[in-house]
Image (cartoon, grey):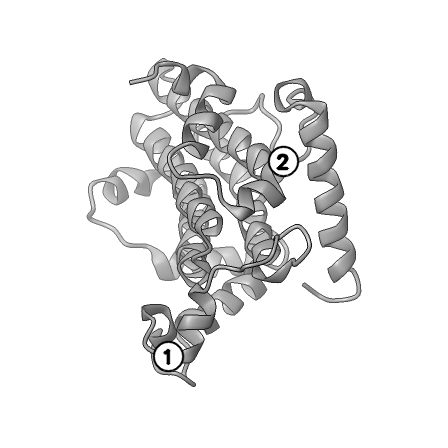
Amino acid sequence: MNKGIRSEAVSFRDSFLSEASPTRVDKGYGAVLRVILFYLWRGCSLSRIAGITGKAEPSAALISLSSYEAILGVVQFIRMGYHADAIVLGRALLERIAIVGYLGENRALIPRYFAGKLTPYKEALAWAKKKSQPNWMILYSICSDVVHSRIVGPAGHINNQTDIGKAFREVRVGDPADDPDLTEELLGIALYSLIALDPLAFKLIQDNDSQPFPTDLDSAQKIGLKDLGEFLDFLQGFIKRYEKHSF
C-alpha cells in the first residue's frame, strides 16, 4: 500500500483520481474535486490521529472517519456521471451527518451505537432540524423526493426502470465546463455535506484546534493557489445562482 496516501494529501488525491480513467467531470471541475478531496483527507487524518493519540474515544474517531469516507462515494459517482446514485448516497450522507452531531451532544450513546445496539435515526433527524446547518432540512427533503419519488414508484428511476432513470444515468456528451447540468448541483451537495460535517465531527473527536471548512486559511498552501482560485470562482458562481432563492 502507498503509505503516502495516509500522510500526504497530494498522494491521496492523485491515488483516488487515478482509480478510474479521467472523466469529463475531472477535466471540467478538477480544481473543485481536488479541494474537496484535500479536506476529506484532512478530516480522515484528524479523526485517525484523535483516536490513536487518545484525544478522542476510538469509537468516536471511527464514526467520524467513516463519515468523511462516505463523502468519497458521492464524489466518485459524480465523477462517473451516475447522478441518481450520488443523490441516493447524498441523502444517506445527510442522515449520517445528523447522527454525528447528535452523538456529539449525547456522548453516552456512542458505545451502544458503535456496537450496533442503537439506531437513533429519528432522534438524529429531529436534532438536525433544530441544530444542524442552515437549509439542512431543505436539502434533505429534495434528496428524499428523488429517492422516494411517488410519480415513478419508490426509487424506480434509480434502478434504470424508467425514462427518468435513463436520463439520470446518462453521461453528458458535452464538456461539463460549458454545460453545468446536474454536475454542479451534485458537487454543491458534496461541498455542503463537508461544510456541515466538519464542525460536528471536530466536536465528536474533541478537536478544538482545527478550523472547519471553508473558514480555515492555513491550508491554502497545501491546496495550491491555482486550485484554490478556481474553486472560489466556482463557489462564487454557485452562490450567485441561488442568491435570490431560499436554497
Residue at disc 1, secondary structure: loop
In the visual, does 54 lie left or right of 167?
left
Q: Residue at x 51, y 25 (%)?
A: 207
In this view, the residue in front, 48 or 56, is: 48
Q: Residue at x 58, y 41 (%)?
A: 27
* Relative vertical location of residue 116 with respect to residue 179 in this rendering, above or below: above
Quadrant of the rendered image containing residue 136: bottom right
Disc 1 marks which amino acid? Thr
Q: Position of residue 191 (x, y in %)?
A: 58, 45
* Relative vertical location of residue 107 with respect to residue 52 in this rendering, above or below: below
Mark 2 or mark 1, which is nearer the start of the sequence? 2
Residue at disc 2, secondary structure: helix
So how many labels did they put on this image? 2
In the rendered image, the quadrant that contains the C terminus is: bottom right
Q: Position of residue 91 (x, y in %)?
A: 44, 59
Q: Position of residue 14 (x, y in %)?
A: 47, 26
Q: Classify 10 Å Cα crowding around label 2: few (below 14), some (14-19), many (20 and above).
A: many
Instruction: Please give the label number shown on residue 43.
Output: none
Q: Are marks 1 and 2 in contact (CB under 8 Å)?
A: no
Hey, which residue is sitting farthest front in the picture? 173
Kindly tell me whether residue 206 is visible in this rendering.
Answer: no
Disc 2 marks which amino acid? Ala
Q: Classify 10 Å Cα crowding around label 1: few (below 14), some (14-19), many (20 and above).
A: some
**Residue bearing the label numbered 1:** 162
Q: Residue at x 54, y 37 (%)?
A: 198
Quadrant of the rendered image containing residue 114: top left
Quadrant of the rendered image containing residue 144: bottom left
Q: Residue at x 76, y 47 (%)?
A: 236
* Relative vertical location of residue 2 with respect to residue 166 in this rendering, above or below: above
Kindly tell me whether residue 212 is visible in this rendering.
Answer: yes
**Residue bearing the label numbered 2:** 31
